[in-house]
Image (cartoon, rainbow, N blue to C red):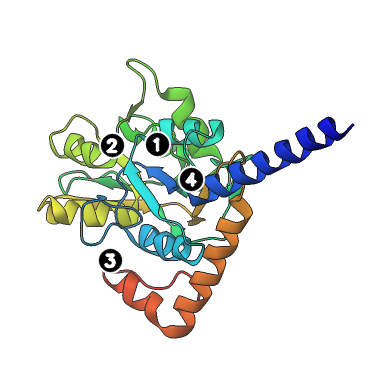
């Protein structure tokens, strides 16, 4: 009896120590390069979501391990618990994961070169053009996403790119004429086109409705709820102090909450 009790106490202590160790490990955040939301980990400004997340993790005494990873892989690994969070996910993409409060809004738009007179006028207007998109992205949680899935095949109407720089590659594909139209975040394309010195060579050709963006945490991370709470507190404090406007201003953005 005493031996069983001692074994039970030892087992309980090991569980507690394991939980403490898990909470002490750096929080592993991953996403593909999607600046201004998340940029290069080595840059002075790594993305406003990363800046906010790093400050929030500090509230819990945690470090943030942020690295780039193809989006499809990031979503797979966060579900499996191999990473702790995927940055910039929509609710549909993150079904079954633990979502932070919205940390921004993303408006996805269609882009063409100045030589093109094509404009988005509903899903039927996509017929006859080759659309470039990023594998695994959610754009409207509806007919556009379904269209991409249906037509993303060899010699189809859609071509999707993968990799941790997929958005940048799609811009280059558009500029060299490999695709007719690309679909991606308005903010991301504006920043990346400017970075490539190609802002004048890309024209917006119609947009979809904005979707909230989140950090999606793994349900296998033992303290996901604490991370969500820390983010909520940090955003509220940054907003009260005016610091949120300063952080967003580095990326040419304004507060997503009126």
Q: Which residue is mark 2?
A: 166
The tag earlier along the polypeptide, 4 or 3, is 4
The tag earlier along the polypeptide, 4 or 2, is 4
In terms of depth relative to the viewer, which is nearer, 2 or 171? 2
**Label 4 CA crowd tier, 10 Å (few <14, some 14–19, many 20+):** many
The tag earlier along the polypeptide, 3 or 1, is 1
- 188 w.r.t. 45: above or below: above
In terms of depth relative to the viewer, which is nearer, 89 or 139? 89
| Distance between the alpha carbons at the discs numbered 4 and 1 | 12 Å
Image location of residue 163, percent across then percent down: 30, 32
Q: Secondary structure at mark 1?
A: helix
Q: Which residue is mark 4?
A: 85
Query: What is the quadrant of residue 116 in the picture?
Result: top left
Q: Secondary structure at mark 4?
A: strand
| Distance between the alpha carbons at the discs numbered 4 and 3 | 22 Å
Determine which of the numbered discs, if any, sits on residue 71 in the image: 1
Q: Mark 2 or mark 1: which is in front?
A: 1
- 243 w.r.t. 16: above or below: below
| Distance between the alpha carbons at the discs numbered 3 and 1 | 22 Å
Asked whether disc 2 touches disc 1, contact meaning CB atoms under 8 Å apart, the reply is: yes
- 135 w.r.t. 48: above or below: above
**Label 3 CA crowd tier, 10 Å (few <14, some 14–19, many 20+):** some
Q: Mark 4 or mark 1: which is in front?
A: 4
In terms of depth relative to the viewer, which is nearer, 1 or 110? 1
């Amino acid at each position: 009896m005493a031996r069983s009790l001692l074994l039970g106490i030892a087992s309980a202590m090991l569980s507690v120590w394991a939980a403490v160790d898990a909470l002490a490990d750096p929080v592993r955040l991953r996403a593909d390069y999607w600046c201004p939301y998340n940029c290069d980990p080595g840059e002075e400004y790594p993305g406003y979501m990363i800046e906010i997340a790093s400050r929030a993790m500090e509230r819990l005494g945690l470090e943030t391990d942020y690295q780039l990873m193809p989006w499809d892989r990031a979503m797979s690994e966060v579900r499996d618990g191999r990473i702790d969070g995927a940055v910039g996910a929509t609710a549909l993409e993150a079904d079954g994961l633990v979502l932070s409060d919205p940390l921004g809004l993303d408006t996805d738009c269609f882009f063409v070169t100045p030589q093109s007179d094509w404009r988005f006028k509903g899903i039927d207007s996509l017929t006859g053009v080759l659309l470039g998109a990023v594998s695994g992205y959610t754009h409207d949680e509806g007919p556009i996403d379904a269209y991409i899935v249906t037509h993303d095949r060899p010699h189809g109407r859609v071509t999707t790119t993968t990799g941790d720089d997929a958005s940048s590659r799609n811009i280059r594909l558009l500029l060299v004429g490999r695709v007719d139209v690309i679909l991606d975040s308005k903010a991301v394309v504006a920043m990346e086109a400017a970075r490539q010195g190609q802002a004048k060579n890309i024209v917006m050709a119609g947009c979809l409705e904005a979707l909230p963006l989140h950090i999606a945490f793994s349900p296998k991370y033992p303290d996901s709820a604490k991370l969500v709470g820390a983010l909520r507190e940090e955003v509220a404090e940054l907003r009260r102090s005016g610091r949120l406007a300063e952080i967003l201003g580095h990326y040419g953005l304004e507060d997503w909450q009126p």
